[in-house]
Structure formats: C-alpha cells, structure tokens
Image (cartoon, helix red, strand yellow):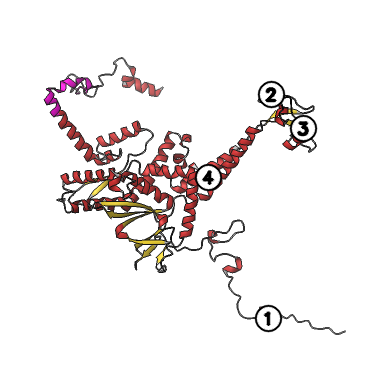
Amino acid sequence: MSRKKLSLRRPSSLASTTPPAVPSASMYGVSGTGYPGAQHSTNRGYIYWPTLDPKRELTNPARREMARRLHALMAASGIPNRVLIGIRNLVIGIGLVPRAITADREWNRLATRYYENRSASALSFDVTGRFSGWEMQRRAYETRLKDGDAAIVYSKSASGRTMRKLYSGLVIGNATDVSDQSQWIDGVYLDALERPSVYRFLTEQGKRSRDIATADMQFLAKYPEPGSIRGEMILKHALNKIIDINEVHSSWMQQIKNSAMIGYYLAAPSTPAGSQNMPAEVMQRMFKNQLSDKTNAASQKVTIKTIMGHGNEIAEVPAGFDIKTLLDERPHPNQKDFMDEMIRDIAWGAGMSSDLLWNIYKLGGANTRYVLADAQTFVEVEQDSIVYGWLMRDYVQEVADAMATGALPMCQDPEWWQHGWTPPARQTVDFGRDGSIYLEEYSRGLITTDRYFALKGQDAREEFIAECDFAEFRREEMARRKLTEADFAYQRTATAPAPAQAPTQEEDPAEDPNQDPEDPNADPENDQKKNQD
C-alpha cells in the first residue's frame, strides 16, 4: 500500500509577502485616539454636536426655539424667574453710578450731575419713554441673560441730546426680504477681519428688516467662544431640567389632590382580587344594588357618599371590612433630594450657588460667608462686563453730545472722558462684623478712602463734598442763631478717653500697677516650683 505525501498549502493571503495593514480606528469603532472621552461606548448615548465653528454653533432657529421655551417657562415656573432676577439684583441692584474724574473738578461735578439728571427721567433717557437710565441698566442686563444678547440703539433728540432704545437680541437675524444673505451670519455682517460692522434688525416677524451700523448702537453679549458673534442665554443648559421639574411637580400636585379627595378606604382580609384594599370599582360593585336609581328620604340620588356618610361620620361599614385612613407618603424624600440636585445643577450652570439663589436656609454662618465671597467674584466680573461693554460708551457719548450742544461747558482737561463707575454695596450677612473689619482696615491705611466707600456703594468724593457742605451750613446756621457747640453737648454719647499718664520716677515702667503683690503667681520662685510639681 503506497503512501500519499500530504502537502499543506498556505492560503494566498497568508503566503503573500505584503505585511498586514495597520489596524485603523474604524476597525474598532473609535475616533483614532487613546483618550477615553473620544471613544464610542455602548454604555453611553451618542452625543450630537454638528459643528465646532463658533459662529455657527447656535443657529437662529435654535436660538428662537430656546427663547420661546424659556419665555413660556418664566410664565409658569418660579425657578427661571428667581435665577434671572436674583442674578440681576446682585449685579445691577439699584444701578451703577458714574463719576467724572478729570483734572477739572468743577466740571466733574457738573458732568456727573448732568448724567444723573438725564438718567433719572425716562422721557429724557429712553426714546420710548419707558425706562429711566437706572431701570434700563436692569432691563438691558436681564434681557442679555434671558435672550442671549441685547442691543442699545442710539439717536438724538430735537435738541441734540443723546437718546436710546433697548432691543432684545431676538429681533436680530437674517431677513427674507433681501437676497445678500451669503455675507451675513445670524443677522451680523462681518468685515474682512471678522469684526461685526452691521447688524440686521427684523420687523414684521422677519418679513422686513433694517440695518444698523455698530457706530450707532452697542451690542450687549457674553461671547461663549473667542470666535463667537452672538451670545447665549444663561439658562441654555437648564431648559429641559425645568420642564422635567414642572412635570414632576404637576404629578405630585395631582397625587396630593387625589389623596385629599379619597380620605379613607375599606380593607378586608381577602377580596375577589386577592388584595387587602378595596378600589373604587369594587365599592361600586358592592353598592350596585343600592345605587340603582334609588333616592333617599330627602329625594336625593343614592351615591357612595350618601351611603358612607358625610364629613367625619361613617353611616355603615360592611361586615368583614375594616375602614382605614389613606396615608400617602409621596413625594418620597429621595425624590425631593433629586429635585434639589436638579435645581443645584441649574444654579451652578448659571454661575452661582443654589444656596444663594434658591434655599439659603440650610447654610450656617461660615458657609454663607464662603458662598457670598464666591458669588462676589461672579458679580464683579459681570459688573465689569456691563461697564466696559456698554456704560462707559454711554457716558462718553452723553457727555460729548452735551458739550456739543452747550448743555455742559467745555472741560479744561483734554482727557475729558475720564470717569469711573460705583457699583452697589457688597452683599453681606453680618454687617456689624464685616463693617468693623472694613473700618479697622481703613483706619490702619490698608484700604484707600475710595475703596472703603465703594464697599458700601458710595462715592468718596461725593460723600466728602456733602460732608463739607453740611459743615459749612452748620457753621452758618449756628452763627445766625447765636449757638455754640456747648448747646449740642447732649448729642455726645461718650467722652474721649483720658490721656495716658507717663510713669513717675517712683514707678518702674516694667511693673504692672494692677498686679496684686499678694498674688503668688507674681513670684518667679513660685512659678518655678509650680513647674517642678
């Protein structure tokens, strides 16, 4: 029997001398990197983010849809109102006040007073006559937070004075009545350096539009990216969470109503359904014969309510059943904790602690001071954004137009535009403690006079001038009435401390005059013995 020689043939793919291909990212379903955050996982959902171009990340339709939802939620929920109004009150408060700081002191007083007088009247400040200068600060900042951005359009009155009109950023966008849309992005026309030069304002629900150059307006926005041309609403991250919270609260409310309507139930050891409780349909079947078009002695239709009684009285309990009170323990504490967690995420996403915006009652003294210190940083950053992004230009334009029309004299300082803004007083939970610290620092020269008064939302120059004016008035009025300082001695609640006396020659300056000579602690030998013991 002959043997056949077996030969093992290698497949052509294995016999090839070409080296195998390097595994590609698509073979493993990853994005070609070792970073876990960039790899796909079946344990997580797909993240959709269509573009990283900052100019096109937020489109105009998406902006308007989010604004529509937020406006509806503000009409139905207190959470977005508290976030927006709470942040607005902390940042703007009663308004930021300007002060001229040129070398011409008399002109500084006139310019500051002129701007404050113009801001105090809505008719002289706003084209529509709705908002004073201080109110427009609050409304402009709140609009920027709510809608993502806002715009102040400048014009002149018949006398040449500066006038303003506030617009929401929702009226800025690409229009349908023009064909040159290729060079416009979300209502903004960019020049060769990608600098906004013209904004397109929509009218008649986008059917018509008018273009306003940046020289005639001030655009208010907090740009999320270096290349962004529009702002984002502060609650962009919270819309779905607020909707979920409202729906959960609606369900809780319905449960509470049901529990209030059904105050008791009948329980038996065994029911046809095998449960301990008797639902409404079982009660209907049980009283079916009694409910069939029957009326009682008062000619009233017989119902379960009339059978079971009114108020706290039970007329009859069927044999074998027991009556029990319905105790609904919903919402569960775990559910309420989760709701607090969602509100905490909403507040922190807006830039502030939920303890400050929502429920500060859980904090203690030290924790409250930390939260306020953290919030103060956010407040100061936002105030700088408002000052440098709008108010500085507003003051300069108002003063320049006033000098041009003769409402203000010409400033003798060539740098007539120099000025500053005083923010509202800092938030504190212990004014006695904090005020004492500020006063101690001021008395030791650790903070300047300007800084000390600014902590209380005051202008040091104005306060000092007012004090000098009052001192002058006091002196003149006392002279007219022939009064002296002795006539006001009753106002002095404390006398000045007596000056310390220098030690006499008989006294040793190193000795303590209050030391008791009989005190054994004064003897060094006793101290030594005490240490040895």
| Quadrant location of the C terminus in the rendered image | top left
Question: Which numbered disc covers residue 287?
Answer: 3
- Dot 3 or dot 4: first in sequence order is 3
- Dot 3 or dot 2: first in sequence order is 3
| Quadrant in which residue 213 is drawn | bottom left
Q: Residues within 10 Å of mark 1 (few under 14, many from 20)?
A: few
Q: Residue at x 57, y 68 (%)?
A: 25
- What's the magenta region? 475-499
Question: Which numbered disc covers residue 313?
Answer: 2
- Dot 1 or dot 4: first in sequence order is 1
The answer to whether any part of residue 417 appears in the image is: no
Mark 4–mark 2 distance (CA, rounded to whole Å) = 44 Å
Mark 1–mark 4 distance (CA, rounded to whole Å) = 62 Å
Question: Which numbered disc covers residue 421?
Answer: none
Kindly check if marks 3 and 2 are in contact, taking CB atoms under 8 A apart as contact.
no
Task: Check disc 4 and report its element: helix, strand or loop.
Answer: helix
